Amino acid sequence: MAISSAHVSLTFKGRILGTVILTVVQFIIGVIHVFSGFLLLSASPTVQLSEIYSIYTLAFGLLTLIFAYGLWMGKNWGWNGTVAVSTFVLIADTLTLLNLPSIPGIPKLAAAAEIIYSLMVLIYLSQTRAKASHKASK
């Protein structure tokens, strides 16, 4: 009697549970950032450096929502876009923490949390992509 080394992944509607969780979290983060971006823009009476952060926040939220949809639908552009946005956030927030030129107005506490989250997203996506390509090669 041989023991199978196959790993059974939990799924929901045909999607790996980790991808479902990532998509839901990305959707929530996107909604929060879109709402915050609009709120920050409406509170800024003049064009200032804080408006740059407001636009950045709004753009990040919109891109996160678009790419979360792509992840949910299993599209390569959803995966690629999420990797690109997470990488950009990782770089911008690291520069902020190092007091180097970055997006003006990024709060340092938020930057630290976003670095940790972005790393988790990138690690998860690199593992799921590797698993998918391994299955496709068999």
Image (cartoon, rainbow, N blue to C red):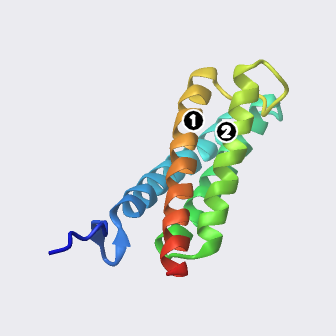
Identify the secondary structure beneath mark 1: helix
Disc 2 crowd, CA 10 A, few/some/many (<14, 14-19, 20+): many
For the residue marked with disc 2, what is the amino acid? Leu
> Measured along the vertical axis of the image, is residue 115 above or below residue 12?
above
Comparing 33 with 81, the one in front is 81
- Which residue is depicted at the point 47% across and 57% down? 27
Q: Quadrant of the N terminus?
A: bottom left
Q: Which residue is mark 2?
A: 90
Q: Which picture quadrant has residue 56? A: top right
**Distance between the alpha carbons at the discs numbered 2 and 1:** 7 Å
Q: Is residue 107 above or below residue 29?
A: above
- Pointer 1 local density, CA inside 10 Å: few below 14, some 14–19, many at least 20: some
> Picture coordinates of residue 7 (x, y %)?
31, 66
Give coordinates of residue 21: x percent, y percent. 37, 57
For the point 57% across and 28% down, the residue is 110
> Is 98 on the left-hand or right-hand side of 68?
right
Which element is circle 2 on? Answer: helix
Marks 2 and 1 in Cβ contact (< 8 Å):
yes
Left or right placement of residue 18 versus residue 27 in this view:
left
List x then y, in percent, for residue 71: 52, 68
Q: Which residue is mark 1?
A: 114
Query: Along the line of sight, which residue is nearer the eye, 5 or 62?
Result: 5
> Residue at left 55%, top 79%?
137
The dot on residue 4 is: none
